[in-house]
Image (tube, coloured by chain):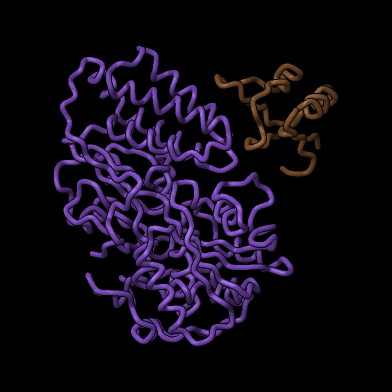
Amino acid sequence: MSPRLRINPIACEAHGLCAELLPELIRLDDWGYPILDESEVPPDLLGLARRAVDACPTLALLLDEDRH
Amino acid sequence: MTFADAGHHGLPRLLAGLEPGGGAMSLAAHTRVHGPLPQVPAHQLIEEVERSGLRGRGGADFPTARKLRAVAERRRVGAVIVNGSETEPASAKDRLLLSRLPHLVLDGAVLAAGAVGARQVIVKVGSNAVDSVRVLEGAIAARERAPVSIAVVTGPEGYVAGEESAVVHYLNGGPELPTFVPPRPFERGYRGRPTLIQNPETLAQLALVARFGSHWYRELGTVADPGSALVTITGAVRAPGVYELAFGTAMSDLLAAAGGPSEPLQALLVGGYFGTWMEASRATSLRLAREDLRSVGCTLGSGVLIALGESACGLHESARVIAYLADQSAGQCGPCAYGLRAIADSVGALAGGVAHPRERDRVLRWTSEVRGRGACHHPDGAVRFVESALAVFDDDIDTHRRGRCRARPAGLPLGGPAVPGGRLR
């Protein structure tokens, strides 16, 4: 099963890098906070998703491998 | 397993033996009404609770047996926390239970502790609940040395302070703010140990199930929603208060229990401020049952029913409530902190008749975007409330734009108890 994106909303500070790096699955709301596509990450986007996770300055973006 | 022949059939159950206007029920009176604390083996109690169909009464409606089992299956269980925060401003049932029927709640907590293997019970109440603290401390002192220790802890008031991860966070020495889950309290809770956290009414119901069994419990209510519930009925009714009613009771009978409407009603708010507005004509035919409420996109929440009279303005009242809910955001999560504020400002503009013609659409976009994006469910409940307000009071938006609203304030309770001291009728 492919992992899903998840966010820790307490840690997120709306830097917005994730939406820059993965616009296919992440857009920003009117206040700059990410709105995630929470379905399984398509295999061809997994590499980009991992890059977005690594780039998050507050480690708020997560790739959930095992939870639902 | 056999159970005591139930002393009381029909209603009241939880509120049996309670005199209106009286004080807290003593241990002797409590034992006279309900019988002594039963000895029930852990697995049997959980099975009996499962057969009873009891669900959590704090608002989340989660099956109690599943919650018990999730903790009981773990090792080195910590505490049972009685979450008496009752931060829903319109709700008064938990305060009523804790300040008038402390032994019923404590019985349930001690039984639950036995069922999950906890050695400690902590009753958490808001710091304003002075009566409850005094009564609980007296009740704890009056009980024989329990197999578990029982302590009362007061904590900050505030809407999200009662959220279960916030309660655990606070008891662990942190601020009263929700935490990112998982881990949930049953995994890592008080002092890092698996923790059972339950609403006082849930535990009071459990104390009766342990005594009289699931068959007795199911004598009232419907198949899907057995038993009775404490409902705080307030707003435009003649006798606001906390009432115990069977599931399956028609909304019109709920209102009648509270003395009936004090004026013609336009809408009911079911489930408190995390709940849903319904047009009165539509609501009164529904029953107090999850299946009925779900069919109109609504839940019972923590058991609050607010009646709105024709003389009031639902749009104004809703604007006040959402402004309050926005203020009550813990401010930890951006979508909740900024989203609810923006939504509240827009609903305020709609109520004030000064909104942009497409403001309503913008609010609905925000409510759908904010949903599910907080660490806790505070934003979810708030946007559900707003969506129902915009649906039910849609016509009023136009009236307000034309400056033709002459309604009187209904004075829905905000930040203080709707029914002072948890008045019992």
**Is B7 left or right of A22, judged from the image as shown?**
left
Instruction: Tell me if residue B211 comes above or below residue A10 in the rendering.
Output: below
Q: In the image, residue B2 lies at what x, y percent? A: 52, 85
Res B22 quadrant in image: bottom left
Res B231 quadrant in image: bottom left
User: For the point 36% across and 25% down, which residue is it?
Assistant: B347
B295 or B241: nearer the viewer: B241
User: Can the viewer see residue B70 in this picture?
Assistant: no
User: For the point 43% across and 26% down, which residue is it?
Assistant: B343
Disc tally is 0
- Rendered shade, chain A: brown
Q: In the image, residue B31 lies at what x, y percent? A: 39, 85
**Is B225 left or right of B173, judged from the image as shown?**
left
Chain coloured purple here: B
Q: In the image, residue A16 lies at what x, y percent? A: 68, 21
B345 or B244: nearer the viewer: B345
B212 or B334: nearer the viewer: B334
